Amino acid sequence: MSLPRTVWNTIKSVVIGHSVTAREIATRPITVFYPEEKPEFPTGSRSVPVLKVNEESGYINCTSCGLCERTCPPGCIDIEQAVDPATNKKKPWPHSYTLDLSHCMVCNLCIEACPFDALEMLDVPELATYQVQDLKFNKEQLLDLWKTGKAIRIAEGQPMPSN
Amino acid sequence: MNDVLAAVLEAIAVLCYVALNAFVLIWLERKIAGHIQRRVGPLRVGGPGGALQSLADGIKLFSKEDFRPGGRDSLVWWLAPLVSMTPAVMVFIAIPFGQHLIVHDMNIGLIFIASISSFGLLGVFMAGWGSNNKYSLLGAMRAGAQLFSYEIPAILSTIGVVLAAGSLSLETIVAKQSAHWFLFPQILGFIVFYIAVLAETNRTPFDLAEAESELVAGYFTEYSGIRWAMFPFAEYGSLFTGCALATTLFLGGWHGPLFLPGWIWFLIKTYILVFIAMWIRWTLPRVRIDQLMDLGWKFLIPLSLVNILGTGAYIALVR
């Protein structure tokens, strides 16, 4: 390339570059000051799968079939089926349902596997604790989480809620 | 005795100003970088807009472990930060901040600044050699080539001003600009000088000496804590002196159109040039070493020679 052309190209690109950065200086920053102001989480954000109560019957939908336990890739779900002490027969609800969030990879597969609509994905991200053991949620804690959080069901075959 | 006392006080005043200036410039740099990238920059530490961030950084760096690399060349490694910081501070004594507001007005002020600021290269090279690290040495080699190459256009571009003013004393040069600044007859010299100042202070289009993506941190890879802090300290000190020199030589120093004190005009012009340097830093990508050398030797030096020739011809024929 000839020298005048190089010089011209250099000046042109420098001017264009500086006009871009000048525009950016004048633009408002997109920073969200997190602890003071909460960001809007997009629809379908996932934080923890929780157990859900059937609004009509008032009982949990879980039948302790164990499909979520078997689907879970990291194996963080642990279900113990309820047993009637008198007859020693198995009952269709869980005696204990433990979810270890420290292992959970929030893949949503347990919710897609559940045939009884018993699980929901929570979108509350602030679940940090000081102890790893505190991330092990039992049945009651999972139900509490469901009650407090804004739960969104994004299982297969269900339409995405449109906010 | 009084002379000694005066010298000590002058040194303390200059050091305080250099330290304060470096703190402000580092904070300003981070704010500008943030806003160019649609962030907000430092904000949480305290002061208006997080202005105390640099102070907090300074305290942190002071309290860090004094880590020394094994296999270093002890004396050279230990002296290098001091050697690179001293000229950056020394240059301040010849800069006229206002009329009679100068530590020492020398009749060879310009030559003094040019020769003293060249010593910065020695510190860089000592750091590169003393660290016994390949990245440090590569960075120092690049810095050597770069600073040596750009010293020449920086000095040649000021000769036009010296010819026009007929003096090497910076106070006289500014006094000669009371009617009109040297910017417009010397626009070529100003452009060459400003680019050369950017290269001499290792600022980003020309920061090959510390190119993070290639050389870790260049010549100060092996430094940490307060020893490391001396290098940015020197860098921002010499950025300020480079811009202050450009103001003195081309932008009329303390002269201004309104009735403000001269030193305010001087600082306004200097900090505008500093802002432009930071703006350039966060806009342009780093050049390659061969492009750097091409720009210096094939473009800036001929341009500054043309400037000297034109100015000389004008003075010889018209005056």
Image (tube, coloured by chain):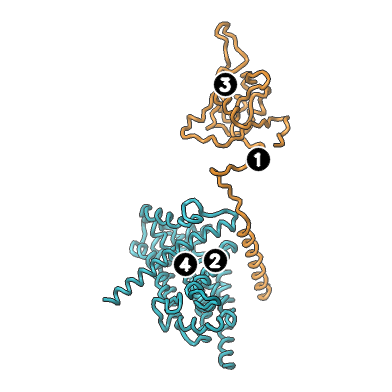
Chain colours: A orange, B cyan
Residue at mark 2:
B275
Q: Amino acid at mark 1?
A: Pro
User: With B21 as the anchor, is B193 left or right in this view?
Assistant: right
Q: Are marks 4 and 3 on the same chain?
A: no
Q: Amino acid at mark 4?
A: Met
Which is more toward the observer, B46 or B234? B46
Q: Which tag, 3 or 1, sits closer to the chain's start? A: 1
Q: Which mark is residue B141?
A: 4
Whole-percent x and y of residue A92? 63, 15
Whole-percent x and y of residue B138? 47, 63
Q: Are marks 2 and 3 on the same chain?
A: no
Residue at mark 1:
A42
Q: Quadrant of the N terminus of chain B?
A: bottom left
Q: CA distance from mark 4 to mark 1?
A: 51 Å
On what subunit does the disc labeled 1 rest? A
Among the 4 quarters of the image, the one containing residue B140: bottom left
Please report the residue visible at 63 percent of the width from the left and 40 percent of the height from the top.
Answer: A41
Check disc 1 and report its element: helix, strand or loop: loop
Whole-percent x and y of residue B212? 51, 58
Q: CA distance from mark 2 to mark 3?
A: 63 Å
- Residue A79 lies, with reference to residue B271, above or below; the image says above
Which is more toward the observer, B252 or B208? B252
User: With A1 as the anchor, is B158 left or right in this view?
Assistant: left
Q: Nearer the viewer, mark 4 or mark 3?
A: 3
Q: Amino acid at mark 3?
A: Ile
The answer to whether residue B297 of the structure is visible from this angle is no
Q: Which mark is residue A79?
A: 3
Q: Are marks 4 and 1 on the same chain?
A: no
Q: Quadrant of the C terminus of chain B?
A: bottom right
